[in-house]
Each structure stands twice: as structure tokens, then as C-alpha cells.
Image (cartoon, rainbow, N blue to C red):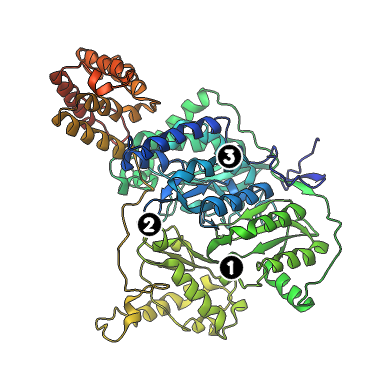
């Protein structure tokens, strides 16, 4: 079927309703032709880990870039599933629920990067879960580690009255192009990108490593480009890289920035590895020089033009009887007032479906998928506020949509301050979490909902909570941001309601509100005497005194250097113990990651070392014999007993690779 696209909206002309099954339409994100092969490779790694061939550290470096994180409860894992711009098809939502119910804790979680997470998956269930998701086009590839992370976009892009144009197709297309290059999974640190449809920057483009803000020049769509932003420790607003680029240049700009980051980022110090720290270290001018060089080289190579596809055909109206919910028209009207907003396209609406703390019980996923498949554009849209929504819902459909959501317990009419309450996972599951941020969010929510303050008058006030300084709850961009330990402020925000700026929190802060908030915080210092006050040492939702038990090493930055150091330690220990084949194998495997190659077997690892290090002259050719002895032994049933390499040669090989490692710079290049 052919469709025509409206330049103004990015949507196609009216067509019949979309299929609700597992077929992936042309416009949707394509995980790539190598997905099955990549899952086979990952399955081998899981098997080697379970059999003890891979250590936990070695397995971590493989699984984290694949979007698989170990949780605070050792032995259980979280799968983070990628959705560029947050669009989820009905069949995909249904499958997510099935996977969570069968392999996880039966609870889906929406993240602040518009992804879905499945929690508490046992190690033996990781691969079956990923294969099941792959059947409906879903992948966790790049969901963690030092990779191109999920590319986000304004939740209302395509339907927002204030947009310049729909940026969703660009988020999808740039994702597909970047992930096609293996280097996208081996960066110095995570690389976060976002698209904003207008200058309001609802997509958070100016607090990302790379941000695109929609612009128009002489009738042509394009972007202002920002680089080096980020939240967390030492948050930084991005610097402007381009005042305007044509929209089709989004990929080459993103790729050129990625190449600069790949070559000059600091892989040795993960605390200073983010792109913003590179810019602060060398200066914006030097960064721009490197960037312009890479951009020119990229253009000279004549890459394939960025191809975007119309993301959403406009749906045909649904011929469904108009019904009123059992609670009556008053409830429906209140829900419409709070949870429904008009699109830029007359007669169509966007429906917000709040998910408290970003959670959706898996048991509700199938019914919600049926609803999504019957209304609007037949897509569920995840937001950076950890909610979901529908688009292109007609006025006549609203009563039926409300009734179906009410039956699922998802039709609570909520003021924006409750819908905009964001919290990361915190210490409940995250190994880096200090505090139970979800417990605090629940307490704040209950307090606000249960008092007499008219929350409707608060406008779009947002409260963001992170369980540690790493900003997974995006606390630096909330109107009220809480990180780590937080102090309750009771009803003191009534001062805002009494001010002339009630309804505009930014104006309130500019007109003395910051001083008021600072004075309020100063009135609540740390309590020194805890006698008789057990609640002061108990976190929200906790039954015992606060403790850092269970907190451990964060996995987001599992890097090449971690894997190299583990292999070199293993090589030295094996050599000292007289296990010469094991020492040779660990030594050969150690630096393969710097050449961006992955061995499929022990013999393959040794052969790749021969190709990339001995044949290239990085390691003395005199050591080729001991490597070849390793290759021959690896093909036998008893490699250790069959190994004929001399102990002195093994020691020389270990020493040579250690010396080479010492000359490895932060961008994985060997210095002379």
C-alpha cells in the first residue's frame, strides 16, 4: 500500500488500522539483520560463564553492553529493552508481559530513556527471554555499558501543537545507522543522544552527550546541535556545536562526534570518561577541530544518505459505540481534563496513562496491548517521565478508552505533579543505589495526594528523585530534584501557592523562591541524637536501619580495561602455578578487545592474536612458536596436557603483552 507523507506532521494520509500481531511494520525500529547471530554468540558466552570458563568479571564485560545487568540480589539480572523514541507495538507489549511473567518478577518497568526493563531474570533464563523478545523485533543490544544508548525524543513529537516538525523518524533512523557499526558498543563511556521537536526541549537534548533541537530555515527542516551535556556528578549543559544543519545530516554529525569520542575519550578513568569531561579537558575549540576533521573525512567517504520513514500513518476512525463508564460522566470528564490533551491535528487527542514509579504489572500487559491495538495510531508511547500514552484518539473514542483503562486500574485522573513524579530504581535493585528512591517517591506521592493542597494549580511542576548522584532519576532537571538522602519539606510549598507566580514554578524561583527553598533546607539539619527516633535511621519502605549492605560496583561502565586486567592477572597466576597453556591462552585473549575482534573459541583467540599482534609486529615474531603450540593444543581433547610450549617462552609472551598493555593509551591505541 502506498502512502503520502505530510511534511508538516511527518504522518501519512489516512489508512486502515494497523495489524495488532507480531509483524513489524516498515516504519518501526529494526534491530538489525545480525540479531539472531548476535544472540547465538551471547548464548555461547552465557554457557561458558555457567560452566566456569568465563569469570564473573569477563562475563560482565560481555553482558552489560548487551543490556543485561546483575541486580542487587546476586544471581538475578535485569534486561533493558531498547525503544528509540519510546514507540511500542501491541504485539511487542504483549510479549514483554509474557517474558516478564515467565522469566522475571512479573513487573515491567518504564525508564527515563523510554525503554522497558524486565527484572529478576535468572541466569539460565536470560537467553530464552532474549530470544522470545527477538521474535517480535525487540533487542536489549546497547542497553547498558559503554555504548550508544537508547536515543530519546519528545514524547509528543508528531502531535505537539508547538513542534517544528516530527523528530521521531530521525531518532529511529540514527539509532539503526549507529548500531550497525560494532564500535557503537565499545566506546570509552555511554553515548546518550536525544531529539527535541522545538525549543522547549522536552526531549532533554541540551543535557545529553549529543542533542538535536528541531529548527526550520528557508522552509527546510533541520537541527541546532548541542554537544557535551550530561547529568550526574558534575552536571553540564551542552555547548552549541551547530546553529543549523539540514535534518538529513543528523547521522553524519552523530557519527563524527562518536568517532572523536572513541579516539580521544578516557577509557582508563571511568569517572572522567564521559564526553563532557573530554570537552572540559581539551577545550571546546580543540574538540571542534577534531570533530571537523572527522566530519570532513566522513563526508569524503560518501556514506549512504540517512533514510527516514514516515513513523505513523494516520489511523482510520474506530467505529465503536460511545459508552459511559460505570462511575458516570463526572468521572469521565475529570479524567479527560487531567489525562487528555488536544493534538495539533484537529479532532485528535493524546491520552496520558500514568504508571506510578514507572511500573506496569505484566498481568495487565496483554489487555493494554489489546486496547492499544484498537485505538489511536495502534502504538503505545513511553515517556521520559516513566509513563505511557496513546496518540490519535478521536473524541468519540474517549469514553471507550477510559472504560477499558478503568477496568485495568489505569484511568486514575492525576494532576501533572503526580504524573511527573520520577524515581530511579534506587537501592531496591541497583547495585549503586544508596537510598530507596522509589520508597521516597511513594511517600511523597501519598503525602501530596492525601492533603488539602489543590494540586491542579501547580501546573507542570516536576519532582525527580535519584537514589545516588548518578542521576538515573534525572534529578538535575526536575523542578524539585532529590538525590541520595532527602529531607521532607512538609507543606511549606504553600508559599508558592500564595505567591503571584502560582502555576509557574520557574517564575516563582526567579522572584525569591530559591532563597525561600534554601532557608527551608537550612532549618532541617542532620539530627545528631537518634535516641527514641528510629524512623530517622530507616529509609522509606525499609523495615530495618539504613545500611549499605548489598551496594557494590556499578556495571554501567564495565569496560575493555576491566576485561584486559582480568585476563592479565589470570595469565600471571597461571604461569606462576605452572599452568602454561592457560597462561598462553589468557595472554593471547587479553588485548583482542583493542582490535575490536571477539574469539569464538580458544583456538580462534590464539589465531586472532597471531594475526593482530605477531603478524603486525606489535609482539616479537620470535614468540610465534609458543602461540602456534597453543593453537595445536586447543584443537585436542586435553589442551593443557597437549601443550608443548616451553615455560621460558610462555614467560616471555606474558611479559611482552604486559609491556604492550602498559603502552596502551586511554583510547585503546598503542604508543610507540
Q: Residues within 10 Å of mark 1 (few under 14, many from 20)?
A: many
Where residue 134 is drawn, which disc sits there? 3
Identify which residue, 431 or 85, lies in the foreground.
431
The alpha-carbon separation of the residues under discs 3 and 1 comes to: 31 Å
Residue depth check, mark 2 versus mark 1: number of the one nearer the observer? 2
The image position of residue 663, as x and y in percent, is: 22, 30
Q: Residue at x 20, y 29 (%)?
A: 658
Q: Residue at x 43, y 30 (%)?
A: 293
Is residue 196 visible to the viewer in this orientation of the structure?
no
Identify the element where label 3 is drawn.
helix
Evaluate if marks 3 and 1 touch, with contact meaning CB atoms under 8 Å apart.
no
Identify the element where label 1 is drawn.
helix
Quarter location, residue 261: top left
Residue 600 is left or right of residue 336, and the answer is left
Name the residue tied to disc 1: 419
Name the residue tied to disc 2: 72
Q: Earlier in the sequence, mark 2 or mark 3?
A: 2
Quarter location, residue 550: bottom left
Which of the image's four quarters has the N terminus?
top right
The correct choice, above or below, for 649 with respect to 441 in the image is above
Q: Earlier in the sequence, mark 2 or mark 1?
A: 2
Quarter location, residue 48: top left
Amino acid at each position: 500500500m502506498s502512502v503520502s507523507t505530510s511534511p508538516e506532521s511527518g504522518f501519512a494520509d489516512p489508512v486502515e488500522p494497523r495489524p495488532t500481531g507480531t509483524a513489524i511494520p516498515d516504519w518501526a525500529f529494526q534491530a538489525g539483520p545480525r540479531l539472531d547471530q548476535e544472540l547465538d554468540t551471547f548464548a555461547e558466552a552465557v554457557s561458558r560463564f555457567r560452566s566456569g570458563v568465563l569469570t564473573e568479571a569477563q562475563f560482565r564485560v560481555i553482558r552489560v553492553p548487551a543490556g543485561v545487568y546483575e541486580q542487587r540480589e546476586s544471581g538475578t539480572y535485569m534486561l533493558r529493552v531498547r525503544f528509540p523514541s519510546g514507540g511500542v507495538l501491541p504485539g511487542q507489549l504483549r510479549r514483554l508481559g509474557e517474558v516478564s511473567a515467565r522469566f522475571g518478577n512479573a513487573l515491567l518497568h518504564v525508564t527515563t530513556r523510554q525503554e522497558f526493563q524486565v527484572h529478576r531474570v535468572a541466569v539460565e533464563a536470560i537467553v530464552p527471554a532474549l530470544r522470545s523478545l527477538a521474535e517480535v523485533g525487540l533487542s536489549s543490544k546497547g542497553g547498558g555499558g559503554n555504548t550508544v544508548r537508547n536515543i530519546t525524543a519528545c514524547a509528543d513529537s508528531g502531535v505537539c501543537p508547538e513542534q517544528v516538525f516530527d523528530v521521531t523518524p530521525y531518532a529511529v533512523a540514527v539509532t539503526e545507522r549507529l548500531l550497525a557499526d560494532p564500535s557503537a558498543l565499545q566506546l570509552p563511556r555511554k553515548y546518550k543522544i536525544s531529539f527535541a521537536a522545538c525549543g522547549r526541549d522536552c526531549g532533554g537534548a541540551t543535557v545529553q552527550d549529543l542533542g538535536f533541537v528541531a529548527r526550520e530555515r528557508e522552509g527546510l527542516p533541520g537541527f541546532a546541535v548541542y554537544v557535551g551535556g550530561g547529568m550526574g556528578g558534575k552536571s553540564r549543559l551542552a555547548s552549541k556545536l551547530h546553529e543549523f544543519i539540514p535534518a538529513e545530516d543528523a547521522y553524519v554529525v552523530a557519527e563524527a562526534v562518536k568517532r572523536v569520542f572513541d579516539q580521544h575519550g578516557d577509557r582508563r578513568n571511568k569517572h572522567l570518561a564521559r564526553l563532557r569531561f573530554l570537552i572540559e579537558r581539551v577545550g571546546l575549540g580543540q574538540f571542534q577541530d577534531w570533530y571537523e576533521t572527522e566530519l570532513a573525512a566522513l563526508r569524503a567517504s560518501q556514506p549512504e544518505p540517512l533514510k527516514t520513514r514516515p513513523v505513523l500513518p494516520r489511523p482510520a476512525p474506530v467505529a465503536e459505540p460511545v459508552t459511559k463508564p460505570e462511575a458516570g460522566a463526572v468521572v469521565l470528564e475529570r479524567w479527560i481534563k487531567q489525562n487528555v490533551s488536544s493534538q495539533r491535528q484537529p479532532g485528535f487527542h493524546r491520552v496520558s496513562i500514568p504508571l506510578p514509579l514507572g511500573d506496569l504489572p505484566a498481568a495487565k500487559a496483554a489487555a493494554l496491548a489489546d486496547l492499544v491495538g484498537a485505538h489511536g495510531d495502534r502504538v503505545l508511547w513511553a515517556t521520559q517521565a516513566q509513563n505511557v500514552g496513546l496518540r490519535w484518539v478521536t473524541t468519540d473514542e474517549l469514553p471507550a478508552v477510559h472504560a477499558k483503562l478503568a477496568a485495568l486500574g489505569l484511568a486514575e485522573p492525576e494532576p501533572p505533579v503526580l504524573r511527573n513524579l520520577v524515581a530511579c530504581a534506587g537501592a531496591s535493585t541497583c547495585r549503586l543505589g544508596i537510598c530507596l528512591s522509589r520508597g521516597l517517591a511513594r511517600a511523597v506521592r501519598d503525602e501530596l495526594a492525601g492533603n488539602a493542597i489543590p494540586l491542579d494549580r501547580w501546573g507542570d511542576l516536576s519532582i525527580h528523585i535519584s537514589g545516588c548522584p548518578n542521576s538515573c532519576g534525572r534529578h538535575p532537571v526536575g523542578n524539585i530534584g532529590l538525590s541520595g538522602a532527602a529531607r521532607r519539606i512538609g507543606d511549606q510549598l504553600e508559599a508558592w501557592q500564595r505567591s503571584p507566580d502560582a502555576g509557574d514554578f520557574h517564575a516563582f524561583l526567579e522572584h525569591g523562591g530559591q532563597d525561600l527553598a534554601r532557608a527551608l533546607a537550612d532549618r532541617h539539619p542532620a539530627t545528631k541524637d537518634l535516641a527514641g527516633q528510629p524512623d530517622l535511621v530507616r529509609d522509606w519502605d525499609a523495615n530495618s536501619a539504613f545500611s549499605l549492605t548489598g551496594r557494590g560496583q556499578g556495571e554501567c561502565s564495565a569496560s575493555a580495561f576491566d576485561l584486559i586486567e582480568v585476563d592479565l592477572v589470570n595469565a600471571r597466576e597461571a604461569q606462576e602455578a605452572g599452568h602454561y597453556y592457560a597462561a598462553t591462552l589468557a595472554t593471547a585473549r587479553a588485548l583482542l578487545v583493542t582490535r575490536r575482534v571477539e574469539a569464538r573459541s580458544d583456538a580462534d583467540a590464539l589465531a586472532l592474536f597471531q594475526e593482530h599482534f605477531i603478524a603486525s609486529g606489535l609482539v616479537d615474531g620470535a614468540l610465534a612458536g609458543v602461540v602456534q603450540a597453543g593453537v595445536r593444543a586447543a584443537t585436542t581433547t586435553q589442551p593443557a596436557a597437549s601443550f608443548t610450549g616451553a615455560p621460558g617462552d610462555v614467560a616471555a609472551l606474558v611479559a611482552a603483552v604486559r609491556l604492550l598493555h602498559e603502552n596502551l593509551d586511554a583510547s585503546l591505541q598503542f604508543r610507540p
